Image: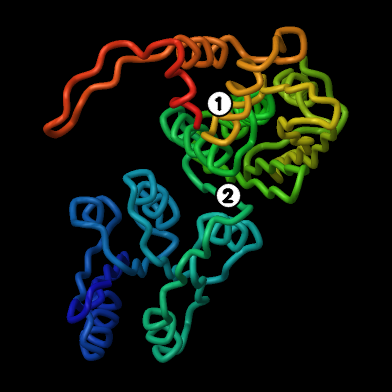
Amino acid sequence: MSSGRRLQVLVVTGEQAVGRALASALRARAFDVRAVDCAEAALSLSAPDVLVSHVALEGLGGFELLEELQRRGARPRAIFLCDRPTVEQCRRALRLGASELLPKPFALADLIAAVEAPRQVPAPEENGFERVASAEVEEIDLALRALLAFLVRQGVQPTARARVAGACSELLDNVQRHAYGDERGTFRLSVELVGDDLALYVEDDGRGFEPGAGSAGGAPAGLARAASLAEQFGVESRPGRGTRVRARFRIWSARFDDTGTVDLSELDYLAPGIARRVLAQLEESALDETLVLSPALAVAVGRMLSGAPLHGTGGGTAGGPCEPGEKTALWS
């Protein structure tokens, strides 16, 4: 939040008197407060920094309101108010990333403290990835794209990326098709990457199924396809209590080995150091039998070997194709 900008708080209650009282108390703390009576009215406003909402509302509920805001790309800190929170409500609030679930009656000081709590700044990505979103086709596609971007940033190679993303796609498709039926719901996707070991988790709060049930009456066949792509695979599920899947993958990187064999088939591109080494070795001797390239990299190496036109960018003279003896300039 930029300096001088007041925290924007949106209060959503089904009781006008309660809403006015909460809004008045928060305005006294110098917040920019708006109060509405229903989720539909809240969605017509710009997204707040902090959402204070009853769980039970006429029409769209508080949890559904937060899900819709998140679907639109907003990430407000959420504080929910509830008469007597159930275990399922607590789990759902946790899955949605809510800051607080305050049981009624609550102390006004507790609500103010929750609103004033410093926003948690996400830690650097490092070796972890997490996404909580609505179990809809569009959100699943965005989650998969974000996962692939994370894997690329972490240097996970194409074959491993294909296995991880393929398994994740199967798991999220199962959530979308089977977990909630005609109801709305969310999923949580997370990844932990430590060394050559990657753990993928996909969780939902849907209908679940009996462990060991076949695809005809229980576990979807997509779980079997996902399992075939992983080294280890486990499912925790119970009817009415959601499903949690954990898959582990071994990740290997391509390297020059001690025998001189060069396996580059798992690289997306040739970094300058590797390009110089490969081209120099090809110039010195024939390595066709020990150099392993993907089709895309073979095209790139072929173009570098054949040379390329160099064009002046200032007052220089535009050059033509490199002479054979000038090829070394490309990897010197």
Q: Give the side of residue 242 with respect to residue 153, left or right.
A: right
Q: Is residue 109 above or below residue 51?
A: below
The residue tagged with tag 2: helix, strand or loop? strand
Q: How many numbered marks have been drawn onto this rendered protein structure?
A: 2
The residue tagged with tag 1: helix, strand or loop? loop
Residue that carries the numbered disc 2 in the rendered image: 129
Nearest the eye: 176 or 147: 147
Residue that carries the numbered disc 1 in the rendered image: 268
> Residue at horizontal 20%, vertical 57%?
46
Nearest the eye: 92 or 85: 92
Q: Is residue 129 above or below residue 269?
A: below
Q: Is residue 262 above or below residue 303?
A: below
- Relative image position of residue 21 (x, y in whole percent): 26, 83
Q: Mark 1 and mark 2 in contact (Cβ < 8 Å)?
A: no
Q: Give the side of residue 190 with respect to residue 55, left or right.
A: right
- Relative image position of residue 242 (x, y in whole percent): 69, 43
Of badges 2 and 1, nearer the viewer stands 1
Looking at numbered disc 2 in the image, what kind of residue is underneath it?
Phe
C-alpha distance separating marks 2 and 1: 21 Å
Looking at numbered disc 1 in the image, what kind of residue is underneath it?
Asp
Q: For residue 168, which quarter of the picture?
A: top right
Q: Is residue 286 above or below residue 190?
A: above
Q: Give the side of residue 198 with respect to residue 47, left or right.
A: right
> Residue at horizontal 62%, vertical 52%?
128
- Relative image position of residue 235 (x, y in whole percent): 80, 37
The earlier-in-sequence mark between 2 and 1 is 2
Q: Would you say residue 162 is visible in this rendering?
A: no
Please identify the quadrant where the N terminus is shown: bottom left
